[in-house]
Amino acid sequence: MDRTEKIAALVTEALAKVGDADLLGAKTLAGIRAFVAAKLGGSGADYYGTVDPIYYRTVGFAYPLAVSGTAVLRDGTYSAALARSVAARRRKGGRLARWDVLRASVAAATDGRLPSDSEVKALADRGGVDLDSSYTGRGTRVGAPATYPVAPVE
C-alpha cells in the first residue's frame, strides 16, 4: 500500500468515527488531518493536498443534491432541474457550496460519475449563478473576479 492509499484509508477510518451531525463541523477537517498526521507523522498542515480532496468528496456524497424532477435526461445530459439545484446550493454558500463538494453531490444525485469542475460550473451558470461573483471559502478569489474590492492590476 503506497502513501496515498494509506492516507485514504486513514481518512476513511477517521470519517467513520464522525457522526453525520458533525461531518460539517468547523473542526472536523482539521481533526482528520491531525489524526492522519498522528498515524503517519508530521503536522496536520502537511496533509492539506491529500486529506482535503478525500474529505470534500465524502461530504459531497453524504449530501446529495435534492433535485425536483429528473437529474439526467434520456440522452445522458444533465437536466435544467439539476442545474437549478446546483445553483441553489452554490448560492447558499458554506462548505456544501464548494465546487469539489458540489461535484460529488451531483454524482450522488445522478449516476455516480464525478463530473468535471467545468461541468459543475456550467450547471451553476445554467442555473443562474454569476460565476464571476460566486465565491465560497477563505482562499484565493481568482475564480471570482467580481468579488475583488478593486480591479486587479495586470
Image: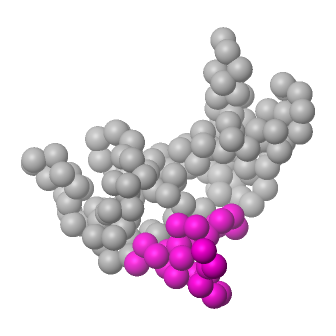
Residue beneath the point at 61% across and 70% down: 141
Q: Which of 81 and 20 lies nearest the eye of the viewer?
A: 81
Image position of 117 (left or right of 23): left
Start and end of the magenta stretch?
130-154
Q: Quadrant of the N terminus?
A: top right
Spot the residue most to the top. 1
Is residue 150 positioned above or below 2 on the image?
below
Residue beneath the point at 66% across and 24% down: 4
Q: Quadrant of the C terminus?
A: bottom right
Q: Residue 70: x and y, percent? A: 19, 57
Q: Main secondary structure of the magenta part?
A: loop
Q: Residue 20: x and y, percent? A: 61, 50
Residue beneath the point at 84% across and 25% down: 40
Q: Which of 99 and 18 lies nearest the eye of the viewer?
A: 99
Is residue 135 positioned above or below 116 on the image?
below
Q: Hey, which quadrant is residue 21 in on the image?
A: bottom right
